[in-house]
Image (tube, rainbow, N blue to C red):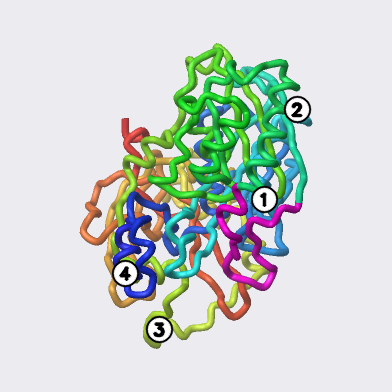
Amino acid sequence: MARKAIAEAVKWAAPGLAGMGKGHRTSCKPDEDSITMAVEAARLCLAAAPDRAPELLQFASTTAPFADRSNSVLASEALGLDSDLRCLDLGGSLGAGLAGLINALSHGEPALTVAADRRATRPGSAAEMQLGHGAAAVATGSEDVIAQCLATATSAEDFIDHYRSAEAEFDYAAEERWIRDEGQSKVLPQAIGGVIAKAGKDAASIDRIVFAGIGAAASRQVLKQCGLDETRLVDPLDSVCGNTGTAHPLLLLAHTLEQAAPGEVILVANFAQGAQCLLLETTEAIAAFASVNPISDQIANGREDGNYLRFLSFNDQVEMDWGIRAERDNRTSLSAFNRHRKTVTGFVGGKCSACGTRQFPKGPACVNPECRSFGTLEDEPFRDKIGLIRSFTEDWLAISPNPPLIYGNVGFDDGGVIMMEFTDFEPGELTVGMPVRFVFRIKDKDPKRGFRRYFWKAAPVAASEAN
């Protein structure tokens, strides 16, 4: 979302925001939330480290879509991970993402830590300019690592720079200068000094410095207090995506590792209910590391949206009149969902062991008219395949929070076809024969019962996947 579009739309009420109207903030589509972003980040992470089988999955968020349903288990099933995986939900603080990573490093078992946040902001507020939606994931273990943990340090302090009560939709933030002088400049230097001392290093040995949870003025102050070189501070990505909450320290760490060379010492420090600090040193293995769809590419390939009213609608802050077709009840049959959970959440179809035909959904019998065997279909995951568009419709009459509803027939690269929705395409962009990939997204919501259904949708193929 272009910040200048926000500033222009709200200047009648908040002219002071004009000075913040530079750059962009990231924003979810209406079929995205913290779970869908987490699944996508985890898929990219696991694709870059395909030999790692996590024994622990941690999902950190302050905006998890379910308050009482394991979001980490839902994500694990979408990722197709084994059911003996230990899953853990973390939240309650913007420090949950980095704290989760420190927890994984402390235990040493192969783990996947993913953090995501879709924080709501009040229209016309400074937070609307400063925050962004995003997710990041980090795989940890003890073999073939690209960075070695040197030390960790945390401090717990109930310094209230902001808060959101359980009943509230938006954060309430305290005065910025007070946060900087009484919170960040007192809490962070102590934790940073502690982690550097534990590692047996000194400030001059830090090659890259990642700060999350603090602004530019506070960063300069903390750097000076700690004797750290300001030129080694990593770009906090404020101008291109905004602060992504629990995901931000992991996002900045991932972005830093994508650029680092062997032997570099990296400090990661996050301010949230105290501080969480991590000191890493990259290994020789990072020279051969290739990120899948690097963050710099994701930023470069982002689409600018200058429609502030649509931005508000996507974030449920404008109630549009979608007509009488939107009045239908949307209750989910939980028993039917449970029967087809692997098909729906895992996007798992079938492959006939007799003739090799692939099909979706799995079904009891092979669809090959020359085979028609019963009971011969084995599980066949479809989520990582490349599909080709066979037909499509842009339907302006069907209900969609982002009209038109685009759906059609997709054939898979090695067999099987399915009628499904398309996402992340603009009207007029689709053509028959175009390759598509598959992403986990919100299918629809049941506002009466507070439930949301997920399924996979066909999306554009990234440039890195097309090559």
Q: x%, y% of residue 462?
A: 35, 40
In the rendered structure, which amino acid carries the disc numbered 1? Ser
Upstream in the sequence, badge 2 or badge 1?
A: 1
Residue 52 in sight from this viewpoint: yes
Q: Which label belongs to residue 9?
A: 4
Upstream in the sequence, badge 4 or badge 3?
A: 4
In the rendered structure, which amino acid carries the disc numbered 4? Ala
Q: CA distance from mark 4 to mark 3?
A: 30 Å
The residue identified by callout 3 is: 325
The residue identified by callout 2 is: 108
Residue at (67% x, 16% y) in the render: 201
Q: Which label belongs to residue 72?
A: 1
Question: Is residue 273 within the magenta segment?
Answer: no
Left or right? Give the position of 25 relative to 168. Answer: left
Residue mark closest to the camera, 3 vs 1: 1
Left or right? Give the position of 239 relative to 88. Answer: left
Residue mark closest to the camera, 2 vs 3: 2
Residue at (40% x, 59% y) in the render: 420
Q: Which residues are magenta?
A: 158-180
Upstream in the sequence, badge 3 or badge 1?
A: 1
Report helix, strand or loop for mark 1: helix
